[in-house]
Each structure stands twice: as C-alpha cells, then as structure tokens.
Amino acid sequence: MRARVQSVTVTWVRTGLGLHLPAWQSHHRTPQLNFSDFQHCGRGSCIRRYSGLTSSPRSSTFYRQLSARHTNSIPLSSQISHRLYPAQPRCYTTMAPVPKTMSGILIEETGGVEVLKWKTDLPVPELKEGEILVRNEFVGVNFIDTYFRTGLYKSPLPLITGKEAAGTIIAAHPSVHTSDPSLQEGTCVAYVADHAYAELTAVGADRAAAIPAGLATDTAAASLLQGLTALTFVREAAGLARPGDQVKGQGQLGVSEGPWALVHAAAGGTGLMLVQMLAAHGARVIGTAGGEAKCALARGNGAQWVVDSKSEDVVGRVREITGGKGVDVIFDGVGKATFDGDLEMIARKGTLVVFGNASGPVPPVDVLKLGAKNIKLMRPQLVSYIVTKEERAAYTKELFELLLAGKVKVKIHEVYPLKDVGQAHSDLEGRKTAGKLLLKV
Ligand SMILES: NC(=O)c1ccc[n+]([C@@H]2O[C@H](COP(=O)([O-])OP(=O)(O)OC[C@H]3O[C@@H](n4cnc5c(N)ncnc54)[C@H](OP(=O)(O)O)[C@@H]3O)[C@@H](O)[C@H]2O)c1
C-alpha cells in the first residue's frame, strides 16, 4: 500500500535562519513524525513533505509536537497549514531501535532463481566508519543482479546481492555526523551500493544522496543506477555535450547534424533512460525492442525510429534509416547476440559502447576488425565514472533535476515483494519486462 504524502507549510517569525534544523531532525525520536529534509525552504516560509504519521496532522497533538520541536531549535510562529497530496511514496520509516536480525535474500550457491533464498534471521550489518544504516523501502532490480546470481560475475559467498535502493537512514556511524551533516538519522536517501536485497543495508555515506522533496521514494530507487548509467555513458562514453553547452552549427561526434545513435533493448530499464537522455542531447535516436508493445514504449520516450528485433532485420533497417551511412554511436547492453551486427551498423569513426551481457558476454574481440572503419570500442561501467565524491554528487544532482523537471521519466514495470525476487529475475531474463523492476521491502 502506498504511503499518503502530505505537506506542511511552516511560517517562520524570523527569516534567514538557514532552515536546515539538523538539531531538531537528528534528536527527534518520536514515532509519530518522520521529517526528512527542508530543501523547499525559502525566506520566511518552508514547505515540506512528510509521511508515516500515526497522529493526524489536524490533531492538536500534532501541532503541539511540531511547535514544541521547532521552538526548541529555532524561533518561529506556530502558523502551520497543511494539505494532502495525491499518494506518492515517500520514506516513512519510524525511528524504531535498530534490530539484531533482519530479513533479506541470501545467495549461498550460484545458479538459477531457486538460489535466491528468503531469510528472516540475517545479522544486521555493523556500521564501520563513514557508514549509514538504511532501512530499505524500494530496491531496484538490475540485470547485473542476475550475473552475480548465476556466477557470471564473481563474488564471495554467501552473498546478499542488489545494487541500489531507497529508504531511510536509521543509524549513522558517529563519523558521519561530522563528515556529512546532510545525511543523518531520518533522512530519506537513495544509493548505489552493494547488498541492497535486504531490510537493512550498511552503505558508505558517500554513496548515498538525500532524495529531494518532490521526488517519490520509488522513483528515486527506480532511476538512480540506470539513470546515472545513461547520463554518464551519453556524456562520457559517447562524448555528447550537455544540451545547453552545444554550440550552434558545430556538430557532435564529428558530424554536422545531430549524431545517429542506436540503443538496443530500448524499452528496458537502462534503454528507456538512454533513449530519453540521447534525445535531450540532440541525437537522432534509433531504438531496437522485442515486440510491438516495447517498440511503442521506446517511441513514446524519444526514439524517433524503432526496429522490432523480433520480427525485423535490424541491420538492414538501420542501413535504410541512415541512408547507408550507419550510426555514429551504438549502446549495446544485449551483448553476444547483437555484437556482430553492431560492427556492420556502425558508421566510419563511430563509437561502439558495449555495456552488458543480457544475451551473454561478447566473446574476445579481434581488434583488427575495428580498423576497417576506425571504430572506437568501449566497455564502460557506471561505477568507474562515479569514483569520486564530486563525480557522484554532480551526476546525481543533475539526474534528480532532470526527474524533478519531468525531462526524464521513469517507467516502473512492476513492484514485486522482496520475497518474490526470483519471479522478478525470471521475468527480466525472460524478456517479459519493459522499464524498471522494483522490490518492495
Ligand atoms: N556497464 C554498466 O555499468 C551497466 C549499468 C546498467 C546496466 N547495464 C547493462 O545494461 C543491460 C540492460 O540492463 P537492464 O537492467 O536495464 O535490463 P533491461 O534492459 O530492462 O532488460 C534486458 C532486456 O534485454 C533484451 N534482451 C535481448 N536479448 C536478451 C536475452 N537473450 N536475454 C535477456 N534479455 C534480452 C530484452 O529486451 P527486448 O525484448 O526488447 O530485446 C530485455 O528486456 C544489461 O546488460 C546490464 O548488465 C550495464
């Protein structure tokens, strides 16, 4: 069930107070309220969202609690108005004590979906320096999770896999209180980090970002990893300029008009993000997708041409669409099944970005094949583009701004209970999904 999200407008007596209220926020432990951030505060007033109330905001108890808390930390009037927003998931975890055990999904041996075991007695991770403990609400499912499950990507076992989630910080190592005051207990965050298939995850604070007001928790969980992948790959792997920075009359990737870009699996989670970002960067986007419904989705998200990979000759159609030139940049997360076709479709001096193995890993490549068209071949990974705190912060900020402005949208295919992660993996590997898969914890 979705948490109902509401807003409170607090009118301050004095202005220019900073309005961050860290003291109030971090010392607040009553279960009735769960405020997270104050990003929408301006001079003299502050609109904020909250959820997870056990007492009604209309009740006098609520006003007394709120006023008492605020007047403890900063002077303000008690003029508080509120209104209901449409249901929009927002972190609502109450500040219960940290438990000793938790539920989650454990992989003890690699294999099929049957190795994803639901457990209710997993030890809660102990916080190390610089870490926060996040009570996950929504966990993103990514194709990479299947690689760790099958053993294509190696990891010590037993393993709690999962690479991204959104939820509430319920504890922070004391070092975080000084190093990152914006990430304290009660803050609603999204992160890209390991071990997300669980109720609680210990995350390096520098891997997490506070979810801005106005962005729902499920949207944040559904967009972070794949949105950052698309943004960094379009900018850094393909080298396309930020939309505002494009110099009129000067082409990108050495071409005079918008470059031709091809996205395989364009209706997938990452594919939909790539298509939208490429369109925003001025590319002429061709998508491939399996089946009519997926093709329509890719078209609706910015692919000007879509080729049905189940029923059409992709190479022939792309040659036709580009007037025989081929495409300047290809984004291929399908891998083994599409790589040879990529070498045919790529234009002279084109960039081939192979970034995944949905159909299996690409076998070792004979580099001599690249010479005929002077192809640039890349095999990037997101994590290597967001190594520094500055890189992570800048790209995350940009992604959140794009989402808040509605310039990039997320399509959630389905939200599965965490317990049913096996079904989610089956659907993803079976090409039955379009958009993002989430797990509800
Ligand atoms: N390198 C990185 O940092 C990075 C980051 C994020 C994602 N990725 C990669 O991006 C790719 C997409 O990931 P995602 O999580 O967004 O998944 P997804 O695209 O939502 O799902 C995979 C899609 O791949 C297509 N596909 C084609 N042949 C397939 C096959 N034999 N088996 C399964 N799927 C096949 C299917 O779309 P159609 O039915 O339309 O063909 C399927 O829906 C994956 O390879 C993933 O590893 C890499």
Image: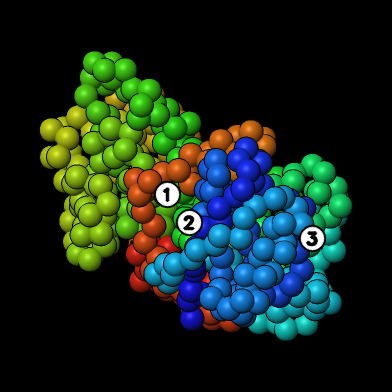
Residue 119: horizontal and vertical position, in percent? 71, 82
**Above or below — where is 190 with respect to 345?**
below
First of labels 2, 3 by sequence position: 3
Q: CA distance from mark 2 to mark 3?
A: 25 Å
- Asked if labels 3 and 2 touch by Cβ distance under 8 angstroms, the answer is no
- Measuring 22% from the left and 54% from the top, which residue is drawn there? 300
Determine whether 165 is above or below 286 in the image.
below
Query: Mark 3 — residue?
Result: 27
Instruction: Label 2: state its secondary structure.
Output: loop
Q: Nearer the viewer, residue 324 or 258?
A: 258
Identify the residue at horizontal 27%, vertical 52% (top origin).
301
Give the total of numbered labels: 3
Percent of width and height locating residue 341: 30, 44
Task: Give the amino acid type for the residue marked by disc 3 in the picture.
Answer: His
User: Amino acid under label 2?
Assistant: Leu
Q: Is 87 on the left-hand or right-hand side of 318?
A: right
- State the residue at coordinates (60%, 40%): 15
The reply to whether discs 1 and 2 touch (Cβ–Cβ < 8 Å) is yes
Circle 2 packing at 10 Å, graded few (<14), some (14-19), many (20+), is some
Residue at image mark 1: 404
Residue position marked by numbered label 2 in the rendering: 215
Q: Position of residue 23 (x, y in %)?
A: 77, 53
Question: In front of the other: label 2 or label 3?
Answer: 3
User: Which numbered disc, 3 or 1, marks the residue that appears first in the sequence?
Assistant: 3
In percent of width and height, residue 425 lies at 50, 72
Q: Quadrant of the C terminus?
A: bottom right
Residue 284 shows in the view: yes
